[in-house]
Image: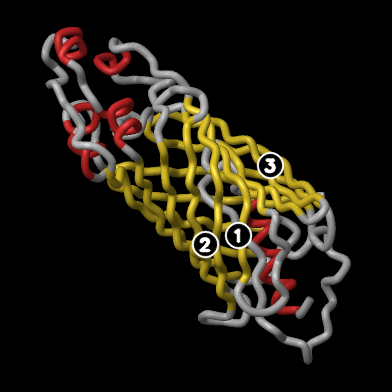
Amino acid sequence: MPVANRIRGMTQKKTAALAAASLFAFPATAMAQDEVPDPYADTVYSGDYLSVGVGVALNPSYSGSDDYVVTPLPIVQGSYRGVDINPRAGGLALDFLPDAEEGPGFDLGVAARLRSDRVDQIKDPVVLGLGKLDRAVEIGPTAGVSFSGVLNPYDSVTVSTDLRWDVAGAHSGMVVDPSVAYFTPVSQAVAGSLTFSAEYADGGFHDYYYAVSPAQNVATGGELPVFDPDGGGFTRAGVTLLMGIDLDGDLTNGGLGLVVIGGYSRLLGDAKRSPFTSVRGSADQFLGAVGVGYTF
């Protein structure tokens, strides 16, 4: 593999491993540099590898809440016999397509997420008084394409989409998560990614998380007015900045590393208008996280 592709692939994978419980992973993509010798053929990422670790995040108590809680984040990232294991928020994705050495890189696989919205850590007493929701288990296909060498020889832009359905019978709906990410190494020890993302959900999802029934209105003493969502639509749009720092000064090898994440999203449509947000919470949602991981 050309050296530029190898450097980009190693830094992307290591940074993603550190952020496994957050929002995105970075596929390895390519730009040919055949005239440069490749000194990275025997890195920890050249075959099967595994990254494990732990992080903590400060995030809203539920989607639309203005109360914030600390959440533990497990870290799992790796590759086994050509199948990449990539992180997702509350889950992971499997990519079955091998990394390309030249031209655009393509991802195709399966994504899964455990959604625990209003299941636990509900701090608002009015919302908590309505009881907890069930956890949703969302599974479906994921696909993406990456373009390298956009602003420098080692950066990339990745466009991807996850399409998932709840198979656990919680919201029993469909969710689509499109995103566009720009990745670049900053130095031999530091890499960063800026990701723009959104979420679209169908009517079943909206009814489960955002509706307020007449009975719930009475139960809250009128604090939450009756609300009937219009149907499917976009629920949020946001941006996330991730910085990965290798503690031995080399992103292309294994070992110990840190990640720092900051994010902002804005709830849209019925997610914004729902009394869970407009009365008891806020449409402005912030995220902060730190993590540590080890790759071998």
Tag 3 or tag 1, which sits nearer the N-term?
1
* Lateral position of residue 73 relative to residue 100, left or right: left
The image quarter containing residue 246 is bottom right
Label placed on residue 26? 1
132 and 98: which is toward the camera: 98
Compared with 259, 117 (above or below) is above
Residue 112 lies in quadrant: top right
Q: Is residue 215 above or below residue 200?
A: above
* Residue type marked 1: Phe
The CA distance from mark 1 to mark 2 is: 9 Å
Q: Secondary structure at mark 1?
A: loop
Residue at numbered disc 3:
76
Secondary element type, mark 3: strand
What residue sits right under mark 2 in the picture? Answer: 193
Decide which of tag 2 and tag 3 comes sooner along the chain: 3
Pinpoint residue 196: horizontal percent, then vertical percent: 41, 58
- Tag 2 secondary structure: strand
Residue 102 on image: x %, y %: 68, 79
Distance CA(mark 1)–CA(mark 3): 14 Å
**Marks 2 and 1: in contact by CB < 8 Å?**
yes
